[in-house]
Amino acid sequence: MSTQPKIKVENLKLWYGDFEALHGVDLDIYEKEVTAFIGPSGCGKSTFIKTLNRMNDLVENVKIEGTVELDGKDIYKKKTDLNLLRKKVGMVFQQPNPFPKSIYDNVAYGPRTHGIKKKSELDEIVEKSLRQAAIWDEVKDHLDRNALSISGGQQQRICIARALAVEPEVLLMDEPTSALDPISTAKIEELVAQLKNDYTIVMVTHNMQQASRVSDRTAFFLNGHIIETDTTRKIFTNPSEKETENYISGRFG
Amino acid sequence: MNETKEKIMHGVFLLAAVTSIISLILIVVFIFTGGLPMMLDYGVFDFIFGTTWNQTTFGILPMIVGSILVTIGAIVLGVPIGVSTAIFMAEFCPPKLYSFLKPAVNLMAGIPSIVYGFFALRIIVPWIRNSFGGPGNSMLAAILLLGVMILPTIIALSESAIRSVPRSYYSGSIALGATQERSIFNVLVPAAKSGIFSSVVLGVGRAIGETMAVVMVAGNQPIMPRGLTQGVRTLTTNIVLEMAYASGQHREALIATGVVLFVFIMIINTTFLIVKSRGGES
Amino acid sequence: MSSKLLKGLVYASTLFTFGILGYLIFYILFNGVAYLTPSLFEWEYSTDNVSLMPALITTLYVVLGTLLIATPIGVFTGFYLVDYANRNNPVVKAISIATDTLAGIPSIIYGLFGFLFFVVYLEWQFSLAAGIFTVTIMSLPVIIRATEEALIASGMSIRQASYALGAGKLRTLFNVVLPVAMPGILSGVILATGKIIGETAALIFTLGTATQLPQSLFASGRTLSLHMYILSNEGLHVNEAYATAVVLLVFVILINGLSTLISKRLSRGGK
Ligand SMILES: Nc1ncnc2c1ncn2[C@@H]1O[C@H](COP(=O)(O)OP(=O)(O)O)[C@@H](O)[C@H]1O
Ligand SMILES: [Mg+2]
């Protein structure tokens, strides 16, 4: 590995109250790659991905130890500007969660939050983001429609556009297609393949085929540990660990 | 700058949030410091168990008994009718009709006490006078009035209690071959009893606290109640009847009446909260 | 008891409940509408016209004044309880208990307190201010509970979406959560309005019963409900009391219609 990792996680532990959900996780995430997290449900994938933009700060009684460095800077340092961090590290959720506002206002919400007021500038960002999310053609004629009135697959792409509109460097996606139909899923996978040219993408998926199709690197989680991280091809063809092999071949999880 | 704004507003919200606590403390302090000294001075026993109330003698037992009797009467009348109406609303009511009846119950809760009182004064009081003799303004009038006034409280809470019983209880009973009626009365309603009981407790609170409607129909004689068709005075009405012109120890005695009422209400509210939290556990 | 008998009781009770309501409304309208004469709506009250106009306007003053104070305090309290404080925070417990307790205190105790504190201790006399502050405290629990419920029902997911875009707490609350929670909060405010319009016991010794329109915050007045109480108590103007009851009923029906409409929109609009 010649390049510096975009995100470097070292010995990260996380407790929900007394329950230790992550037991000292180490991971490097590289720029302009898709890194996939796989593992049986409840193993800590969501918990881990949320530590990367500090969404766990919103959960009560969470305690975190260890370091997460973004471009070499620890994001858990006291002085970290959370709003700026989350602008740099965007997130797309499992359930599409558009605001009950117009499509336009959904996408413009982030830029407005970060101080952009000029209509022409916002128009430009909204169009660019919707194009990037491959949904511009479907919605360009009714940007003032309520985002809740369109289909689930479209909603999820609006949420992706909304995340892209603040020009993040990293995009976190927690099972972004698990609530969608196969056609919408295929569209979003295509989109991810496009987006990795410009963004660093981290994606949780419970769908092994999806991981092998879209990701460059895969981390296998089990019971709050990362058992193995490697290139996706290696993980899926020749894993080093027995547990990984068992999981890949469908013997548990 | 954003950081400061967040901090300031956090402070503002906290400040707003403690308003309730401060208000409650102020209420307790002013009512109790206004009434307790008189009670201690006059003698707590003589005050609470004295049966004579006039310009110089302050025994409030007649009002305590009056409040209790009127409340019991209202409950005896209002609970069966209210709970039965709630059962109808939750189980027997066709959806079309329900969309009229539900707002009607809310409306019933929203009609001012003064309108209920006036209605009772014009309808119930003359009816009692004509049917049973006596002045008409009476304990019975107060009971009938309060029995109606607590209906919306009883109906709303009982209905939601019945609705929150898992549907499987009902289908389980039906599957055993029980009729719809049997399943409702023998399975659903008993399962909702803690919620229904808390509606009764709340109804007690309403009845004992009601003032302006009662004062219009109850006769208000400050003497031990002597029968359903005779007048009665309650704790609440005692305050409102004389506060306007009372002074000195007399005024303090009225505030002390408020203290006693407050204690009654606290007991009822605590019961309600306990019943409610018990219901939430199971 | 047999089920058939019980079922009969259920139907009879329902008939009684709604029969009484219908009779009350019909009776008031039947006896009152005819006395809604123009003279009842003259600007100045006199013993001849027994105008309810000053009382009507005073009612609006009291409602507006109270909502102006109670709404922000109640809504902000809801914000604090749901979005700021930790659920196990002792302050939250205390506020919760205080709110429940305030909700159970009868109006006459509020009236007594308002009299002792605002009228006597702060020397505000019988006044608009004393009345407004007294019913403000009464309205708080209604608005707080409605706000709390609406905020909780608006869900975590839209909050997370906003935070994940780098929005702060305030922006999330005001731009994303509040629009969703608004109908619920509004129905609480409407409920409080109904309560204020119907209030008498808490106002009679705080706002007082002056017949004229109060000219300042520290002048006495009477609301419609108080006006009606006094008319029926004096026994001299029973017809006008009926007419006032009609006006009160119309208000209450309008308010209830409004809140039904909002709650319909609530359940239809979904999330
Ligand atoms: N807010 C929470 N409080 C307590 N425990 C939690 C919370 N969120 C998740 N957990 C627990 O942490 C573990 C990991 O959960 P999660 O990260 O959601 O797993 P995954 O996304 O891999 O399915 C699970 O055992 C789960 O029950
Ligand atoms: Mg998960």
Image (cartoon, coloured by chain):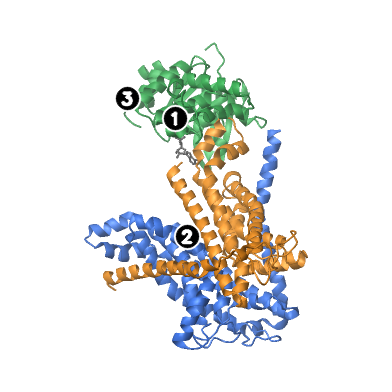
**Chain letter for the residue marked with disc 1 in the picture:** A
Quadrant of res C63: bottom right
Q: Colour of chain A?
A: green
Subunit bearing disc 3: A
- Which hue is chain B drawn in? blue
Residue at the spot of label 1: A155
> Is any atom of residue A224 visible in this view?
no
| Of B253 and B120, the residue lying toward us | B120
* Ligand 1 closer than 8 Å to label 3 CB: no
The quarter in which the N terminus of chain C is drawn is bottom left
Mark 3: secondary structure: loop
Residue type highlighted by circle 2 = Asn
Tell me: is circle 2 under 8 Å from ligand 1: no
Compare residues B28 and C151 and report the one nearer the observer.
C151
Where residue B120 sits in the image (x, y, percent)? 50, 75
Please identify the residue farthest to the front as the structure is shown: C38
Give the quarter of the image for residue B27. bottom right
Q: Which chain is orange?
A: C
Mark number, residue B106: 2
Marks 3 and 1, Cα distance to the nearest angstrom?
33 Å
Type of amino acid at the residue the image marks with label 1: Gln
Q: Are marks 2 and 1 in contact (CB under 8 Å)?
A: no
- Quote the CA–CA distance across marks 2 and 3: 61 Å
- Residue C88 position in % (x across, y down): 57, 50
Q: Nearer the viewer, mark 2 or mark 3?
A: 2
Up/down of A36 relative to C192, above or below? above
What residue is drawn where x is 38% and y is 66%? B85
Disc 2 secondary structure class = helix
Q: Earlier in the sequence, mark 3 or mark 1?
A: 1
Q: In the image, is A159 to the left or to the right of C70?
A: left
Location of residue C266 in the rendering, given as x and y in whole percent from the top left corner: 47, 46
Identify the residue position indicated by label 3 in the image.
A249
